[in-house]
Image (tube, rainbow, N blue to C red):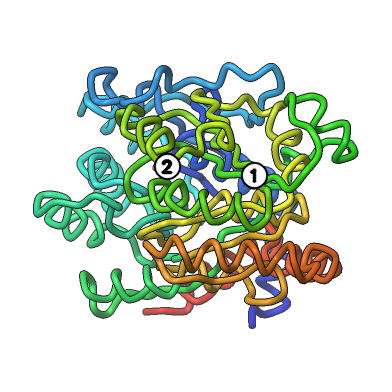
Amino acid sequence: MISSEDTVRRLRICLVGPAWPFRGGISHYNTSLARELALRHEVSVINFSRLYPDFLFPGKTQYDESGSTHRVESERLIDSINPFTWIRAGFRIARSRPDMTVVQWWHPCFAPALVMICAILRMLSSTKIVFICHNVVPHETSPIDRILSSIAFLAPHAFVVQSQEDRRNLLKIRKKAVVSSHPLPIFDFFRSGEMTKEEARAEIGEGEGPLLLFFGLIRPYKGLRHLIEAMPSIGGRTGARLLVVGEFYEDSTPYFELAGKLCVSDRIGFIDRYIANEEVAAYFTAADLVMLPYLSATQSAIAQVAIAFDRPMIATRVGGLPEVVSEGKTGFIVPPADPEGMADAVSRFFDEGWGERMAPNFEKEKKRFSWASLADTLEEMHSKLSRRK
């Protein structure tokens, strides 16, 4: 526990990572954390001026084109491919004399920039550097990724990980790391009002009947293929329809062809685009059940959006998903790459009325996944590092 002296002390905290105008989960995470910490401390955000070079980015745009943006004030200093900006950012942070610098870590391609910034902070300041790891290693990794991660993980004083799998992965790379665990908080900022399920379905053009939702960027590790393979059984047993909502980061043709081959094209709706912030609520409110058929995962922001909207989930037993989806309380856990097991779980959910049975459990889960709790963890980490010699 932190002492009463640490509790009342107002810290200077610098967050390093993407924020608006960049889109996506890491940007949303950084913004929500900045807002929470600003309730207690003096917070600054050092953002990127360029995140991914355009030729490396698989999507249509890196920028948030939503009508309703989730933003925080930031300084856009870091160009991911310009070392001079890394040096400038390091000196800028050092001059502000933060008590703690919190760095978002999600991919080794940013290791050179973050290592340079942290090296300058180590030389010129006494700030405590903490990496928040969204993925210790990428979903699709390579030997160079592991080398870059090994170098980068020498830079911080401590780490926060969001699943036990990531804790194990981290300790394989840096055996004596100072590390705390905190689950990914809920992404509740999408919920900015109330609408009924009927209103939500009318908004997205869906009618009555059981509705499944697969949401988010589509990449091989997310296991969508196996969910499509489950749809003949799911449709035959429950009459459910599936919405696949998100931008493809790979060739979409095999998915459409598979749906056609299995004669379930009429049961699957594909919305192949990045979903604006103001549209998210309608899709989650309309759905009865959120599907997470991942083949690998450390955690999932989609699960935390589902919890924010009180939506039960079917998730696979990979990575940190079983730590988030509570079996029989907020969803069911099934083996990965098992279409029939997935179909059995969906059928059980609807046949046995689990939607109503699970509904009362979500308020308690929201407290477990709060941003305030993550802020507590960072405060405790700063206190721990400050006491170390």
**x then y, percent, for residue 286:** 76, 40
CB within 8 Å, label 1 to label 2: no
SS at mark 1 in the image: helix
Q: Is residue 367 above or below residue 131?
A: below
Is residue 298 visible from the viewing direction of this image? yes
**Residue beneath the point at 50% across and 49% down:** 98
In this rendered view, identify the residue nearer to me: 338 or 138. Answer: 338
The C terminus lies in which quarter of the figure?
A: bottom left
**Residue beneath the point at 76% across and 67% down:** 367
Is residue 37 visible from the viewing direction of this image? no
Seen as rendered, the residue at the extreme bottom is 1
Q: State the image quarter where residue 117 is shown.
A: top left
Q: Amino acid at mark 2?
A: Leu
In this rendered view, identify the residue nearer to me: 379 or 58. Answer: 58
Q: Is residue 184 above or below residue 90?
A: below
The N terminus lies in which quarter of the figure?
A: bottom right
**x then y, percent, for residue 270:** 53, 29
Left or right position of 191 against 298: right
Task: Measure how far apart labels 1 and 2 are at the Cα level.
Answer: 42 Å
In this rendered view, identify the residue nearer to me: 362 or 287. Answer: 287
Q: Which of the marked residues, 1 or 2, is nearer the chain's N terminus?
A: 1
- Say the numbered circle drawn on residue 32: 1
Frontmost of labels 1 and 2 is: 2
Left or right position of 85 against 366: left
**x then y, percent, for residue 293:** 47, 56
The number of discs equals 2
SS at mark 2 in the image: loop
Say which residue label 2 marks. 262
**Residue beneath the point at 43% across and 22% down:** 62
Q: Amino acid at mark 1?
A: Ser
**x then y, percent, for residue 115:** 24, 47
Q: Is residue 336 above or below residue 25?
A: below
